């Protein structure tokens, strides 16, 4: 018999665990800084389009009670199941390297907790020697994926829900404590002023709007298939619309809390270099987190404790998202009549092996982050397509506005699904590709380049061709009647 | 901080944190009614 989340709060806290990840902590503050501070916040607040996508995922999972492949087969038709396979694969491909990222966070928590991090004379070489050691990233990747798999093995209620009931309140407490410490630093007001002062001329720059769209598209975990997977375990009469609003706004609340912390700290401690530091990108946005944050904490009284807090919060955020990725892949295999334990063992072993290249090579890591990060936009578009094919009015009436709904979803949902989300996906993918072509006009087509249009098309075409060719077999296995 | 920054801070925090807290309160109320 299938498990269900024990309560509304168990479900919400678990989905918040998906939404709040490392992107809130290390990407959001940097993107805000790079796009004019306060000016960026205006479009960022306007584009809360992730909420209808969260609703869509909830409704599809709850309606079909299948993982990504079965959901698409049931909702849109068997011949479109390859789209669900693609959505599931993208989240799985991200899981391979996300486990490595979570491992970095755990390593830095240990370094901070044992006092070794702040004693280091040069934080850049600490980071480089960690990454270049090769065995350390692999070891911490193993530790992370093993921890995640052990949590998922205990099931939805005793594993995922129980872990999130600890991880998320602990994460929020650590972030609130760090924020309180940051805003009480002398000079923190300068950071707040930078964060909240709007430069209205920056709003004329289309890049600010596109970055705000991108941040909202990537940040909440909407369109990944992860929320859809947790929705399989929703109670029958569970609300969707209010829960989705709560999760979308909760995720953005955390982003804002982190931005206040980072801006206050950086401006209080190194006001003359603050803007440069906040713009430090580094591989996968790690520059600010792993190089500058330790330097900043080494100046604050009690920095040892707060750096340990910060990296523990980061590790918790990463782990709560990672367990959702493990559950997604496991659910897809369980739909094929494989037992939970066997499916999980398969996912664990494959991730253990396929995470190694990202742990060993930063170039490979960046290539995967680029290729599958952009592919998430396609996943979002496939979700919107599924709703349109099913009939957007029918979907809204049957799946969102059912008698137990706490909020009525209006006609705006249809507009967003029909026009706004497809337009957003088209504009963003075109813009990201245009940037790459402009930056590297000679190699943008190269399928083996680190970040190129060619590598995206090569890898996407390869997996979509395989999924199309194997569609009938995959659907046949997935839509069998007896399922765990 | 200038008046504009404070105004912007209040607006953004009201929409994002206020929206979150309002949704949370509504959800708690709805849950109690069930």
Image (cartoon, coloured by chain):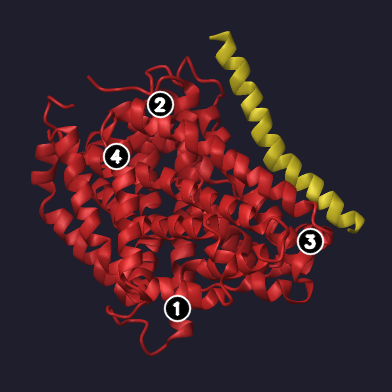
Residue occupying the far right of the picture? B3
Which of the two discs, 3 and 4, labels the residue nearer the N terminus?
4
Q: Which residue is at 8% across, 45% downward? A: A473
Q: Which residue is mark 4?
A: A150
A384 or A42, nearer to the observer: A42
Which of the two discs, 4 and 1, labels the residue nearer the N terminus?
4
Which of the two discs, 2 and 1, labels the residue nearer the N terminus?
2
Q: Which residue is at 49% across, 50% downward? A: A21
Q: Is residue A98 left or right of residue A285?
A: left
A385 or A196, nearer to the observer: A196
Q: Circle 1 marks a residue in which chain?
A: A
Q: Which residue is at 29% across, 55% downward? A: A142
Q: Which marked residue is nearer to the observer: mark 4 or mark 1?
A: 4
Q: Which marked residue is nearer to the observer: mark 3 or mark 4?
A: 4
Q: Helix, strand or loop at disc 2?
A: helix
Q: Helix, strand or loop at disc 4?
A: helix
Q: Which residue is mark 1?
A: A436
Marks 3 and 1, how far apart in space? 29 Å
Q: Is residue A251 left or right of residue A324?
A: right
Q: Which residue is at 59% across, 66% downward? A: A118
**Res. B17 image quadrant:** top right
Residue A176 in sight from this viewpoint: yes
Residue occupying the far bottom of the picture? A442
Which of the two discs, 3 and 1, labels the residue nearer the N terminus?
3
For the residue carrying disc 4, how many other residues have a C-alpha within 10 Å: few (<14), some (14-19), or many (20+)?
A: some
* Discs 2, 3: same chain: yes
Q: Which residue is mark 2?
A: A399
Q: Circle 3 marks a residue in which chain?
A: A
**Res. A245 image quadrant:** top right
């Amino acid at each position: 018999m299938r498990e269900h989340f024990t309560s509304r709060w168990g479900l919400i806290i678990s989905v918040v665990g998906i939404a709040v990840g490392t992107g809130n902590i290390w990407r959001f503050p940097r993107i805000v800084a790079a796009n004019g501070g306060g000016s960026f916040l205006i479009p960022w607040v306007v584009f809360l389009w992730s909420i209808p996508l969260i609703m869509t995922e909830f409704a599809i999972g709850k309606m079909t009670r299948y993982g990504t492949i079965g959901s698409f087969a049931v909702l849109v038709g068997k011949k479109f199941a390859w789209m669900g396979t693609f959505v599931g694969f993208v989240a799985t491909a991200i899981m391979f390297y996300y486990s490595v990222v979570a491992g970095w966070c755990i390593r830095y928590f240990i370094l901070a907790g044992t006092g070794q991090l702040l004693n280091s004379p040069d934080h850049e070489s600490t980071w480089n020697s960690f990454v270049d050691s090769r065995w350390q990233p692999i070891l911490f990747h193993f530790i992370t994926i093993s921890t995640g798999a052990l949590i998922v093995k205990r099931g939805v209620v005793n594993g995922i829900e129980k872990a999130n009931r600890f991880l998320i309140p602990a994460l929020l407490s650590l972030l609130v404590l760090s924020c309180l410490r940051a805003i009480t630093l002398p000079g923190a007001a300068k950071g707040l002023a930078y964060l909240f002062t709007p430069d209205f001329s920056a709003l004329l720059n289309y890049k600010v709007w596109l970055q705000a769209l991108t941040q909202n598209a990537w940040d909440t975990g909407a369109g990944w298939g992860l929320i859809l997977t947790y929705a399989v375990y929703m109670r029958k009469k569970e609300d969707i619309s209010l829960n989705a609003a709560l999760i979308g706004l909760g995720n953005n609340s955390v982003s804002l809390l982190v931005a206040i912390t980072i801006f206050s700290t950086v401006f209080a401690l190194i006001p003359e270099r603050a803007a440069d530091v906040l713009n430090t990108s580094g591989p996968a946005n790690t520059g600010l987190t792993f190089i500058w944050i330790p330097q900043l904490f080494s100046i604050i009284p009690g920095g040892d404790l707060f750096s340990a807090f910060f990296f523990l919060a980061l590790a918790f955020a990463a782990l709560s998202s990672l367990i959702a990725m493990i559950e997604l892949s496991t659910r897809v295999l369980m739909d094929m009549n494989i037992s939970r334990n066997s499916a999980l063992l398969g996912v664990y072993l494959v991730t253990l092996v396929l995470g190694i290249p990202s742990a060993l090579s930063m170039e490979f890591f960046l290539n995967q982050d680029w290729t599958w990060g952009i592919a998430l936009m396609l996943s979002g578009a496939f979700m919107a397509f599924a709703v349109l094919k099913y009939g957007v009015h029918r979907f809204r009436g049957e799946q969102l506005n059912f008698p137990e709904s706490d909020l009525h979803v209006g006609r705006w949902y249809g507009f967003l699904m029909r026009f706004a989300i497809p337009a957003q996906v088209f504009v963003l993918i075109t813009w990201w590709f245009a940037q790459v072509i402009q930056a590297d006009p000679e190699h943008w087509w190269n399928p083996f380049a680190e970040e190129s249009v060619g590598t995206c098309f090569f890898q996407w075409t390869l997996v979509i061709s395989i999924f199309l060719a194997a569609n009938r077999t995959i659907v046949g296995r997935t839509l069998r009647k007896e399922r765990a | 901080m200038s008046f504009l920054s404070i105004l912007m801070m209040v607006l953004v925090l009201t929409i994002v944190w206020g929206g979150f807290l309002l949704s949370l309160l509504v959800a708690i109320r709805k849950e109690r009614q069930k």
